[in-house]
């Protein structure tokens, strides 16, 4: 016959408390893999690349800028020829949709859909940091040229 150790109620509460309160710490130490590849993520990245190539001249001339919430926006429509304005606004809108889809899909691929907001913030900072000098960035409601 095997003998199992008998734990007091206080010891069991202490063990339960350690497990309960250490779980959020362990979760907080995890970080998202932003380089993860899935067919869906690769498709979104390809779409974003194609749209970037179309928007690059407008990012360079200041018509379009990056926002501090991980999106793009038309900053000065007057810098876009009238004949192209509707098309560029549609590309910006499509690009923003793809960016939001990327953040959500990355969070899902990491097994933490609740991380989408943090992933979005991380990408916003990265894109702003990597933006070349001369591009416009919307920070705290004001456009600033890098």
Image (cartoon, rainbow, N blue to C red):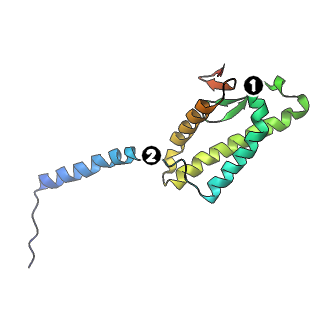
Q: Nearer the viewer, residue 133 or 46?
A: 133
Residue 139 point in image, percent of width and height:
60, 24
Left or right of residue 135, residue 6 in this image: left
Q: Position of residue 3 (x, y in %)?
A: 8, 72
Q: Are marks 2 and 1 in contact (CB under 8 Å)?
A: no
Closer-to-camera residue (56/14): 56
Q: Which residue lies most toward the right here?
A: 83
- In the structure shown, which secondary structural element does the residue marked by tag 1 occupy? loop
Mark 2 — residue?
31
Q: Quadrant of the C terminus?
A: top right
Q: CA distance from mark 2 to mark 1?
A: 34 Å
Q: Residues within 10 Å of mark 2 (few under 14, many from 20)?
A: few
Residue 43 pos. (x, y %): 68, 54
Q: In the figure, 75 relative to 94: above or below? A: above
Residue 111's mark? none
Q: Is residue 41 above or below residue 73?
A: below
Q: Is residue 138 above or below residue 50?
A: above
Q: Secondary structure at mark 2?
A: loop
Residue farthest toward the front in the current orientation of the protein: 133
Mark 1 closeness class: few <14, some 14–19, many ≥20 residues within 10 Å: many
Residue receiving disc 1 = 62
- Quadrant for residue 131, please give it: top right
* Relative horizontal placement of residue 101, taking residue 61 as reference (left or right): left
Residue found 60% across the figure and 58% down from its top? 38
Instruction: Name the N-terminal-most of marks 2 and 1.
Output: 2
Q: Residue at x 13, y 55 (%)?
A: 9
């Amino acid at each position: 016959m095997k003998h199992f150790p008998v734990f007091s109620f206080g010891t069991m509460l202490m063990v339960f408390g350690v497990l309960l309160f250490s779980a959020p710490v362990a979760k907080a130490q995890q970080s998202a893999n932003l380089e993860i590849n899935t067919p869906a993520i690769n498709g979104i990245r390809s779409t974003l690349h194609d749209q970037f190539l179309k928007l690059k001249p407008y990012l360079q001339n200041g018509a379009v800028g990056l926002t501090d919430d991980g999106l793009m926006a038309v900053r000065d429509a007057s810098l876009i020829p009238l004949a192209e304005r509707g098309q560029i606004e549609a590309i910006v809108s499509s690009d923003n949709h793809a960016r939001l889809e990327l953040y959500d899909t990355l969070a899902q691929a990491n097994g933490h859909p609740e991380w989408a907001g943090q992933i979005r913030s991380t990408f916003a900072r990265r894109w702003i940091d990597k933006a070349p000098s001369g591009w416009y960035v919307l920070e705290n409601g004001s456009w600033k040229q890098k």
